[in-house]
Image: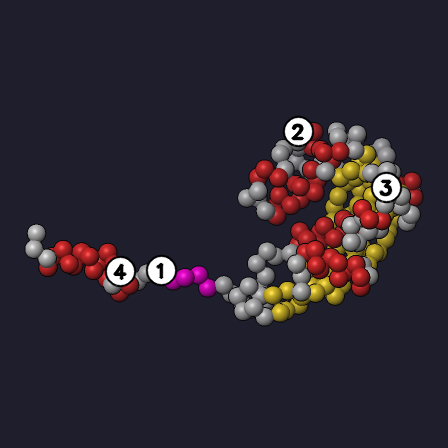
């Protein structure tokens, strides 16, 4: 899959695909990150380790000069449990369903890139400013941009890995224990209770 971008500008995991290489019936691809690529992605995503990162993808034409990519991302990551501080391994599988269109067809390069922002927004709805609504694509993500006649499947798979990471990783079976509410004995011994008791003893 040839590309024309400067290698220094490419993401850690890059597998460019030219739009013109996709046949009318579509094509199936499986891509896997190398050891060096996984090491770079682990550092970028704050992982203790990344033993596997691959994508099984189907790419087919969509509308005029555009593409649809479906499939799934599979990864095996090593993380630190936020409760026990132990290292642990886990498998992550994320479905992929993304449209790509030339930037001008999507409205502009900025609007086309809203697809990635909207995906992150659905995982982190508290960041409402990340993805302002776009009436042209009401109910669906705007397409990601096709740049220089190509898309980057490696970058797409790496993005879905980042989206699939739990921001508060816990080992299987480990639960986060919330602080217990104050009981009657705790309330009785609170500073306010003691102050109230002193008011009854001290002369007014």
Secondary structure under the numbered disc 3 in the rendered image:
strand
Q: Residue at x 72, y 50 (%)?
A: 159
Secondary structure under the numbered disc 2 in the rendered image:
helix
Mark seen at residue 190: 4
Q: Quadrant of residue 134?
A: top right
Upstream in the sequence, badge 2 or badge 1? 2
The magenta segment: 177-181
Upstream in the sequence, badge 2 or badge 3? 2
Q: CA distance from mark 2 to mark 1?
A: 46 Å
Q: Pinpoint residue 33: horizontal percent, then vertical percent.
A: 80, 59
Q: Residue at x 16, y 59 (%)?
A: 197
Upstream in the sequence, badge 4 or badge 1? 1
Question: Most prominent secondary structure in the magenta stretch?
Answer: loop
Q: CA distance from mark 4 to mark 1?
A: 13 Å
Q: Is residue 44 left or right of residue 149?
A: left
Of badges 2 and 3, the one in the foreground is 3
Residue located beneath label 2 in the image: 135
Front residue (pair 135, 24): 135
Residue located beneath label 3 in the image: 150
Q: Pinpoint residue 137: horizontal percent, then vertical percent.
A: 69, 32
Whether residue 46 is visible to the viewer of this picture, yes or no, is yes
Q: Pinpoint residue 99: horizontal percent, then vertical percent.
A: 77, 40
Front residue (pair 88, 194): 194
Q: Is residue 179 magenta?
A: yes
Of badges 4 and 3, the one in the foreground is 4
- Cβ–Cβ under 8 Å for marks 4 and 2: no
Residue located beneath label 1 in the image: 181
Front residue (pair 85, 43): 43
């Amino acid at each position: 899959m040839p590309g024309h971008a400067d290698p220094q500008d490419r993401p850690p995991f890059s597998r460019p695909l030219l739009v013109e290489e996709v046949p009318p019936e579509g094509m199936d691809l499986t891509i896997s990150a190398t050891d060096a690529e996984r090491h770079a992605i682990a550092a970028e995503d704050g992982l203790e380790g990344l033993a596997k990162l691959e994508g099984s993808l189907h790419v087919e034409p969509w509308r005029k000069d555009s593409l649809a990519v479906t499939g799934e991302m599979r990864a095996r990551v090593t993380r630190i449990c936020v409760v026990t501080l132990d290292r642990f391994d886990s498998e992550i599988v994320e479905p992929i369903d993304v449209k790509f269109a030339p930037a001008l067809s999507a409205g502009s390069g900025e609007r086309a890139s809203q697809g990635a922002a909207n995906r992150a927004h659905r995982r982190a709805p508290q960041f409402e400013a990340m993805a302002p609504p776009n009436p042209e694509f009401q109910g669906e993500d705007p397409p990601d941009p096709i740049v220089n006649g190509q898309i980057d499947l490696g970058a797409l798979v790496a993005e879905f890995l980042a989206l699939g990471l739990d921001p508060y990783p816990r080992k299987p079976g480990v639960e986060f224990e919330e602080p217990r509410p104050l009981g009657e004995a705790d309330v009785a011994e609170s500073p306010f209770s003691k102050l109230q008791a002193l008011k009854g003893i001290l002369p007014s």
